[in-house]
């Protein structure tokens, strides 16, 4: 039986920033990739929406590795600080 996105959950949320799309759901994107779902459902969010604008302003979700958003790092709470330190040291994030 093939894997279907509807078995995993709702679409991932993406936002267009300066002509590039970034996910707001890194862990869910990683889950889709790990499940080898080829057609990942997504929903384009409006960056003017107050909740989305707050996420963007916080910088928590909009600090892409290498400035491009091609990679994600998933770390639990205890590992996040050290993972971010390594990425900053390598000049991959701000």
Image (cartoon, rainbow, N blue to C red):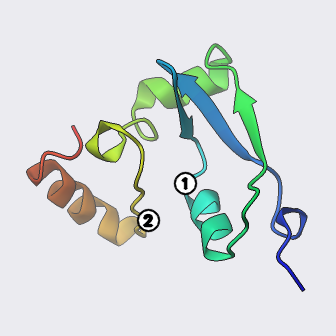
How crowded pointer 1 is (Cα within 10 Å; few <14, some 14-19, many 20+) is rated as some
Determine the residue positioned at 25% across, 55% down.
84
Residue identified by numbered label 1: 26
> Which dot marks residue 74?
2
Spatial separation of the CA atoms under disc 1 and disc 2:
8 Å
Determine the residue positioned at 70% across, 28% down.
45
Tag 1 and tag 2, C-beta contact below 8 Å: yes
Mark 1 or mark 2: which comes first in sequence?
1
> Which dot marks residue 84?
none
Determine the residue positioned at 43% across, 30% down.
58
Determine the residue positioned at 64% across, 37% down.
14
| Residue 38, horizontal then vertical, whole percent | 72, 63
Q: Nearer the viewer, residue 82 or 44?
A: 44
Quadrant assignment, res 35: bottom right
| Residue 80, horizontal then vertical, whole percent | 33, 62
Instruction: Look at the picture and state if 87 lies above or below 46.
Output: below
Placement of the N terminus among the 4 image quadrants: bottom right
Task: Label 2: state its secondary structure.
Answer: loop
Placement of the C terminus among the 4 image quadrants: top left
Quadrant assignment, res 83: bottom left
| Residue 46, horizontal then vertical, whole percent | 69, 20
């Amino acid at each position: 039986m093939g894997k279907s996105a509807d078995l995993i959950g709702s679409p991932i949320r993406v936002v267009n920033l300066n002509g590039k799309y970034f996910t707001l759901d890194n862990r869910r994107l990683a889950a889709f990739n790990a499940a080898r779902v080829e057609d990942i459902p997504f929903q384009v969010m409006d960056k003017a929406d107050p909740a989305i604008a707050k996420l963007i302003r916080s910088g928590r979700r909009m600090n892409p590795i290498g400035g491009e958003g091609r990679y994600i790092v998933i770390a639990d709470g205890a590992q996040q600080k050290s993972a971010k330190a390594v990425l900053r040291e390598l000049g991959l994030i701000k």
